[in-house]
Amino acid sequence: MGQSQFVVAALYKFVSWPDFEQSRTGLLRVCIQNQVFGTLLLASEGINGTIAGPRDGIDQVLSYIRALPGFAKLDHKESLAETNPFLRMKVRLKKEIVTLGVPGISPTKQVGQYVAPEDWNELIAREDVVLIDTRNDYEVEIGTFKGAIDPQTTSFREFPDWLRAQTGLHNKPKLAMFCTGGIRCEKSTALALAEGFDEVYHLDGGILKYLETVPQADSLWEGECFVFDQRVSVDHAMQPGSYDLCHACRYPITEQDKMSKHYKPGVSCPRCVGTHSELQQKRFEERQKQMQLAKTRGSAHLGQQIEGAKT
């Protein structure tokens, strides 16, 4: 790995962690000491976040987390970046590490059956299986599995109401769910079991692990996969995809979108034009101006940081 490259590590783990608040200061300290930036969310149900830094620094932070009680088997996914996509380190205390908004639903109590990527095609090809994409509309729009149901949610908080409204789903005995990296499926399958579904499955490691594991010739994935980092999307080869990001609404945009009269870099796109107040637009314009000045100077601007995922 070249000196200019940074390791980006996405991680999560559900564990029962009643005294999670006590770990905040130590985690923040070890990240800063190792020049690691990003965001970590801590809750009584576990940890979730994305961090970036030098190879040695990331290794030190991951070792520190795995030494915490219950986190020895913490898994993570890595990618590389030429510049650090984060400018600050945040360790936040939360009620949930991924917000579903349903009290009592926790993968530490019950969760769906994990299905390895190499076994996923066989499962979802069965006629008695209902395949559900648990991600939000802007993610599904640019890619999904063939035949998957799109709940058309704008945030993960809407998923419980959508699931409860699908009374017809009980006519088929098996549900198979998937998401980007696996974390939302932990919550959605726990919810489905609580709602009375007997057989619930989810893709272990999410779409990203599937793309890494299953040869493209055998793949049932169609399109690209939205990711919550500077790449915006990845293709089946896990290379940066064809989408950019509207920094006003945080939705993916195409080169065709950029040719629209409604596209103004950092301020609006065809999807969000006219939806922001005059004050917001002025703020976006100033942010874009500062980003361009920083780019000209060859330095990073705070506004370039991807603050986090829409849930």
Image (spheres, helix red, strand yellow):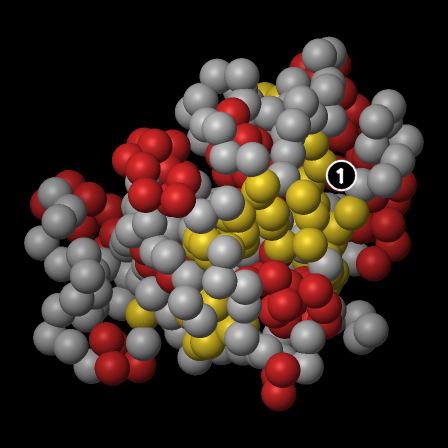
Quadrant assignment, res 144: bottom left
**In the drawing, does residue 60 fall left or right of residue 84?**
right
Quadrant the C terminus occupies = top left
Work out whether 39 lies above or below 87: above
Quadrant the N terminus occupies = bottom right
Label 1: how many Cα within 10 Å (few below 14, some 14–19, many 20+) = many
Residue 247 spot, x, y in % from top left:
33, 58
**In the drawing, does residue 181 fall left or right of residue 131?**
right
Quadrant assignment, res 84: bottom right
Callout 1: SS:
helix
Q: Judge by depth and name the residue closer to the eye, 207 or 301.
A: 207
Q: Give the residue number, with chain letter if any, for mark 1.
A: 31
Image point (58%, 41%), residue name: 199
Does any portion of residue 236 appear in the rendered image?
A: yes
Does any portion of residue 305 appear in the rendered image?
A: no
Image point (32%, 43%), residue name: 168
Work out whether 147 lies above or below 192: below
Residue 302 spot, x, y in % from top left:
47, 50
Image point (44%, 48%), residue name: 172
Residue 66 spot, x, y in % from top left:
86, 36
Quadrant assignment, res 100: top left
Q: Judge by depth and name the residue closer to the eye, 279 or 96.
A: 96
**In the drawing, does residue 289 fall left or right of residue 27?**
left
Residue type indicated by callout 1: Cys
Image point (80%, 41%), residue name: 74
Residue 272 spot, x, y in % from top left:
18, 56
Q: Judge by depth and name the residue closer to the eye, 71 or 288.
A: 71
